[in-house]
Amino acid sequence: MKRRERGSCESCTYYIYDEDCGAYICDMDMDEDEYIRLVSDSHYQCPYYRNGDEYVVVRHQM
């Protein structure tokens, strides 16, 4: 099985700016256990990560 590359939250589609709190947040609906594991374990890969780069497919085709 191919190991997925861990992406940073900053490049994730679900990492958005929330105007109400004035900061960037993860917009995925995860429970408290998932969030604690994501923050505390550096080897844990976020199961919800999705690359927010719209041009990744185009660059791959070139």
Image (cartoon, grey):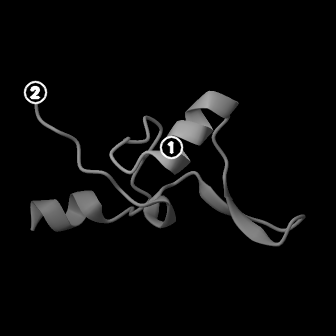
Residue drawn at (38%, 51%), measured in percent from left and top?
42
Residue drawn at (19%, 67%), measured in percent from left and top?
59
**Mark earlier in primary sequence (1, 2):** 2
SS for dot 1: helix
User: Callout 2, which amino acid?
Assistant: Met
Of residues 36 and 47, which is closer to you in this image? 36
Q: Residue 55 is drawn in which quadrant?
A: bottom left
Q: Is residue 49 left or right of residue 7?
A: right
SS for dot 2: loop
Residue lying furthest right in this view? Answer: 20
Check the image and report above or below for 58 versus 36: below
User: Tag on residue 16?
Assistant: none
Gap between marks 1 and 2, in whole Å?
A: 22 Å
Residue 27 in view in this figure: yes
User: Tag on residue 1?
Assistant: 2
Q: Is residue 25 left or right of residue 42?
A: right
According to the image, label 1 marks what residue?
38
Q: Are marks 1 and 2 in contact (CB under 8 Å)?
A: no
User: Callout 1, which amino acid?
Assistant: Leu
Q: Position of residue 13 (x, y in %)?
A: 51, 54
